[in-house]
Amino acid sequence: MMNTKTEERLSKKDIMELYQINRKTFETWVVKYKLPIIVISDKRKFVRISDLKDWENGRIERSKEVDR
């Protein structure tokens, strides 16, 4: 397991650019879909890359269950 103090993170801006989403969608993902974020301040939010991968995999698994 990687030390969380030195683990790579993506900023809110990085996430928005990666998924081509706006601020409102990002906040929806945090509140409604429980995207795990690290809040430093109102304008400084980050997501650990490992948390993002886990969150994505969980979303994929849930969508497969719905398709059944």
Image (spheres, rainbow, N blue to C red):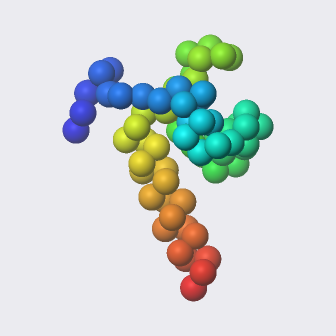
Quadrant where the N terminus is found in the figure: top left
- Above or below residue 29? Residue 46 is above
Identify the residue at the far left of this view: 1
The part of the image, by quadrant, that contains residue 63 is bottom right
Above or below, 54 against 2 in this view is below
12, above or below 58, in the image = above
Q: Residue at x 60, y 36 (%)?
A: 17
**Which of the two residues, 24 or 35, is positioned nearer the viewer here?**
24
Q: Is residue 68 left or right of residue 3?
A: right
The one of 5 and 16 positioned closer to us in this rendering: 16
Q: As drawn, is 29 to the left or to the right of 49?
A: right
Residue ID at (64%, 43%)? 20
Question: Can residue 31 be seen at all in this image of the molecule?
Answer: no
Quadrant location, the C terminus = bottom right
Residue furthest bottom as drawn: 68
Instruction: Point out residue 48 in the picture as x, y percentages from the top left corner.
Output: 42, 33
Instruction: Give percent across and percent down for residue 50.
Output: 37, 41
- Work out whether 6 lies above or below 23: above
Which of the pair 39/52 is nearer the observer? Answer: 52
Q: How many marks?
A: 0
Can residue 44 be spotted in the picture?
yes
Q: Quadrant of residue 15?
A: top right
Q: Residue at x 62, y 36 (%)?
A: 16
Residue 35 pos. (x, y %): 57, 43
Q: Position of residue 41 (x, y in %)?
A: 62, 14
